[in-house]
Image (cartoon, helix red, strand yellow):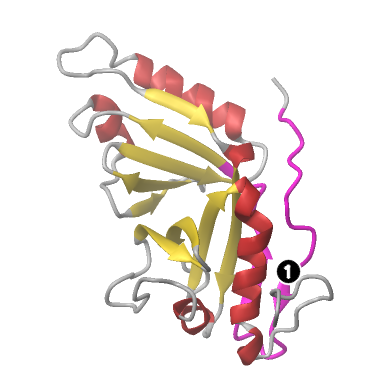
Amino acid sequence: MSETTFNSPVDVGPLSAPDGSVTVADAASTTKVQVRGGAGTGAAAELGVGYGSSQRRTDGALVCGTRPDEWTIYAGSGQASAITAALSEVFGHFQGEPGEGFVTVIDITHGRAMLRISGSNATAALNKICNLDLSDELTPDGAVFSASVGNVSCDLVRDDEDGQTSFLIGCERSFGKFLFIAVADACTEFGLSVPHGWELHGH
């Protein structure tokens, strides 16, 4: 089955401060697969990640413990069918075993917008519009959590790249453009320029 072309609600960027201290980039085409199942099941053991943490697999996919008994797997664009099929096959081996219960695997790629904010000022920018403390102590690399960002309910992953602070932020697709605008606006004091038409209203 071929992948459906993803049309992102964001058609600008990536946006970067001249000194590279912060970058905001659309990541909506990221493959997003949701898994739900009991914490004590073979499926949960196969995923190997607890609630609030993440781990990158050898194939590059990022497995996140998004909520109790719920995981989200992020991967490069166009991989949803392959990941969903592979997981369903693996989890199928556990079906019928005592205490295994029902496990669901759903491709949520097209229902969720996503962006990535990176750089030495990424945390400072996000702290302006996020209701959680994003310090290294509370949200270290690999942390998975939910928070309000720009008054939008979001799922976040601290996913540092090349030793640089980086967050993946996902939300309902309908809020994707607004979230991008809000995050970009929070970065303007660090030198990031926002294109015409993408300014925060009233700013």
Return the residue nearer the eye: 79 or 103: 103
User: Is residue 54 found left or right of 40 in the rendered image?
Assistant: right
Q: Position of residue 94 (x, y in %)?
A: 28, 16
Q: Position of residue 98 (x, y in %)?
A: 15, 13
Q: Residue at x 71, y 30 (%)?
A: 3
Q: Residue at x 36, y 58 (%)?
A: 145
Q: Residue 156's image quarter? A: bottom left
Q: Residue at x 62, y 47 (%)?
A: 173
Return the residue nearer the eye: 42 or 149: 149
Q: Residue at x 67, y 69 (%)?
A: 181
What kind of residue is marked 1?
Pro
Q: Neighbour class for label 1 at 10 Å: few (<14), some, many (≥20)?
A: few
User: Is residue 8 found left or right of 48 in the rendered image?
Assistant: right
The image quadrant where one finds the N terminus is top right
Magenta segment boundaries in residue numbering: 3-31
Residue positioned most to the left: 98
Q: Is residue 80 above or below residue 91?
A: below
The image quadrant where one finds the C terminus is bottom right
Q: Is residue 76 above or below residue 94?
A: below
Q: Is residue 25 magenta?
A: yes
Q: Is residue 157 above or below residue 85?
A: below
Q: Position of residue 110 (x, y in %)?
A: 64, 38
Return the residue nearer the eye: 159 or 108: 108
Q: Position of residue 45 (x, y in %)?
A: 25, 34
Which residue position holds label 1?
14
Q: Residue 18's image quarter? A: bottom right
Residue positioned most to the top: 96
Residue 20 seen in the current view: yes
Q: Is residue 82 magenta?
A: no
Residue positioned most to the front: 202
Q: Is residue 157 above or below residue 43?
A: below
